[in-house]
Amino acid sequence: MQHITILERDPIIAEDIRDTMAALFPDAVIDVHDELRAFCDALAARAAPNGLAIVHATTGELRDPELARILTARDVRTVAIRAPLADAAFANWVFLTPPFTTPDLQAAALRAIRRI
């Protein structure tokens, strides 16, 4: 069973992302959060190895050491909703630059899951 954890502050966009992921992965357990701490806590507590995270956050939040530790320790595949960052720390992430369509989000999620 796929576990998907989403960080999105806009409730309408969060619902759209959740619905898109539910359609793409009908058996997935999906958690949606609007705050970085709650998102990190959910990843630490529930995300199965190789789970998927969809993160809409600032550059500073993406560089949060706790977020990086959890994503690495849990081997979580990550889609960041923002312009790409060139840092080596994000080399295995998939970046999805807004605005995007539902097919763009689906393709990004599938690319992230396939990354090693």
Image: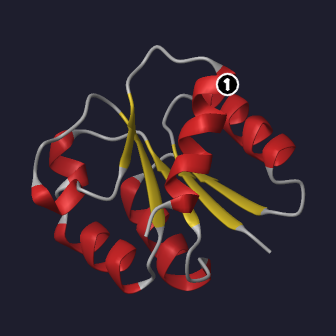
Which quarter of the rendered picture does the C terminus lie within?
A: bottom left
> In this orientation, does residue 66 appear?
yes
According to the picture, the residue beneath numbered tag 1 turns out to be 103
Please, is residue 86 above or below residue 33 in the view? above
Q: Quadrant for residue 64, please give it.
A: bottom left
Please identify the residue farthest to the left as the structure is shown.
Answer: 87
Q: Quadrant of residue 106?
A: top right
Residue placed at 55% from the left, 60% from the top?
114
Left or right relative to 68: residue 80: right
Task: Tell me if residue 64 comes above or below residue 22 in the rendering.
Answer: below
Residue 14 shows in this picture: no
Q: For this rendering, which residue is in front, 108 or 7?
A: 108
Q: Where is residue 68 in the image (x, y as percent from the top left)?
A: 26, 70
Residue 92: image location, x then y, percent: 32, 59
Element carrying mark 1: helix
Give the residue drawn at x 10%, y 51%.
Answer: 87
- Position of the N terminus, as image quadrant, is bottom right
Q: How crowded is mark 1: few (under 14 residues within 10 Å), some or many (20 or more)?
A: few
Name the side, left or right, on which 35 lies relative to 92.
Answer: right
Asked which quadrant contains residue 15, the reply is top right
User: Percent from the top left, x then y, of residue 90?
Assistant: 23, 55
Q: Which of 10 and 104 is in front in this view?
A: 104
Q: How many labels does the image show?
A: 1
Q: Which amino acid does label 1 sit on?
A: Pro
Rendered position, 42 above or below 82:
below
Judging from the image, the colouring scheme is secondary structure
Q: Which of 22 and 106 is in front in this view?
A: 106
Which residue occupies 79% across, 37% down?
19
Q: Is residue 46 left or right of residue 97?
A: right
